[in-house]
Amino acid sequence: MLMTNHIEISFCIPTYNNIASAKRLILNILEFANRNIEVIVLDNGSTDDTLEILNTINDTRLKVYSNGINKGALFNMINVLDKGQGKYLTYCTDHDHIDNSKIEKFRIFLQNNSSVSCGYCEYASKSEKQYELFESGYPAISKLGYITRHPTGFFFRRDIWKLINPVERFSDFELVDLFPLEFVFAEATLIGDGAIYHDAVFSPERGARVIKHKSSTTNGKSKSAFFSPLTRLKLAVNFDKHLRTLNIPKRQKQSLIFSIFYKELVSATLGFKSVMFNDALCAHYYMEKRVIGKKEIAKIALEFYDGYTNRVIKVYYKSYAQQVKFKLALWKNLTLRFTGKALSKYLKRSTNN
């Protein structure tokens, strides 16, 4: 798809009833003195004065759209990116922060690496590298596909975004939950290279700011919250289903299947435990802080495995022999992963002592 304009980066921001933070973020971006960027805002039927205030900002690089009514967080996430006209589309939530002194280096990075189809800006990186590139195919999808991280700083090459057509294909909440961009990453990395940009251009709210800002999309008391064990199981199943449609070698596909299972199992158990013991996140998601003990973790893990067995293993492996073979390979992979983690922690403690 040929570019018909000069816009290099679209900063795409979905918003809902959060004008103070959204305005701060927008003005910070617009302080970047480059005419080849744009800021796209899609308001999701805010009941405050969001539209009135945004329409007072006098900068032609700002383009404000409205859904009229609240169409849900998933709709806003996908559609705000789809409205961008830049060569690269970047995603920010309306309560994110941006270091506008770093935008120019990020722009130059994208300009000099046009083979990059997608990637994300790391906001807590310990790497001394400015960025890492991963070759299209298995190297890129293994680093970016199905990662379920906070979407702050995700970016996509627009022509590839349009080719994948996420608005039509990844707007079903039962399929993608609040993680549609992970599905896009998986497909985009088979078309172009992937990237992790380590210089913290964007950062999400953290600490005390999270406590003050209540989530407008997630109630943590619901079993369908994105961090709940049931949702992580749904994602493991749907990621697996999507991955099996991709054109990659069988051996690499199986390695990714094991990786998805492991990551979502950890998210459903240890990740869930961590969220429920975090004061800021509990306040943000309207929850009471509580301790998840070993027995509950074991119960969650067993239910996760049973659910995965019934919805994946028994579906794709018809014979009993095939099922046993896959389960053995799965458990071998899990054992190696957990053993490797334990050994790494032991070596780290030994080194520190």
Image (cartoon, rainbow, N blue to C red):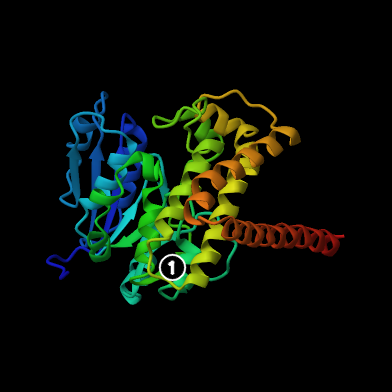
**Left or right placement of residue 63 versus residue 17 in this view:** left
Where 261 falls versus 229 (above or below)?
below
Tell me where residue 255 sits by quadrant: bottom right
Q: Dot 1, crowdedness within 10 Å: few (<14), some or many (≥20)? A: many
Label total for image:
1
| Residue drawn at the location 43% of the way across and 57% of the way down | 201
Q: Which residue is mark 1?
A: 195
| Residue drawn at the location 63% of the way across and 58% of the way down | 330
Mark 1 belongs to which amino acid?
A: Ala
Q: Is residue 130 visible?
A: no
Q: Give coordinates of residue 299: x percent, y percent.
A: 68, 35
**Left or right placement of residue 314 versus residue 13 in this view:** right
Q: Give coordinates of residue 162: x percent, y percent.
A: 22, 60
Question: Residue 199 or 157: which is nearer the viewer?
Answer: 157
**Left or right placement of residue 184 versus residue 344 in this view:** left
Tell me where residue 332 sits by quadrant: bottom right
Q: Give coordinates of residue 338: x percent, y percent.
A: 71, 57
Question: Residue 97 or 277: which is nearer the viewer?
Answer: 277
Question: Residue 126 or 307: which is nearer the viewer?
Answer: 307
Q: Give coordinates of residue 226: x percent, y percent.
A: 48, 38
Tell me where residue 188 sits by quadrant: bottom left
Q: Residue furthest right?
A: 353
Q: Quadrant of the N terminus?
A: bottom left
| Residue drawn at the location 57% of the way across and 29% of the way down | 282
| Residue drawn at the location 23% of the way across and 49% of the way down | 168
Q: Quadrant of the C terminus?
A: bottom right
Q: Is residue 195 visible?
A: yes
Q: Secondary structure at mark 1?
A: strand
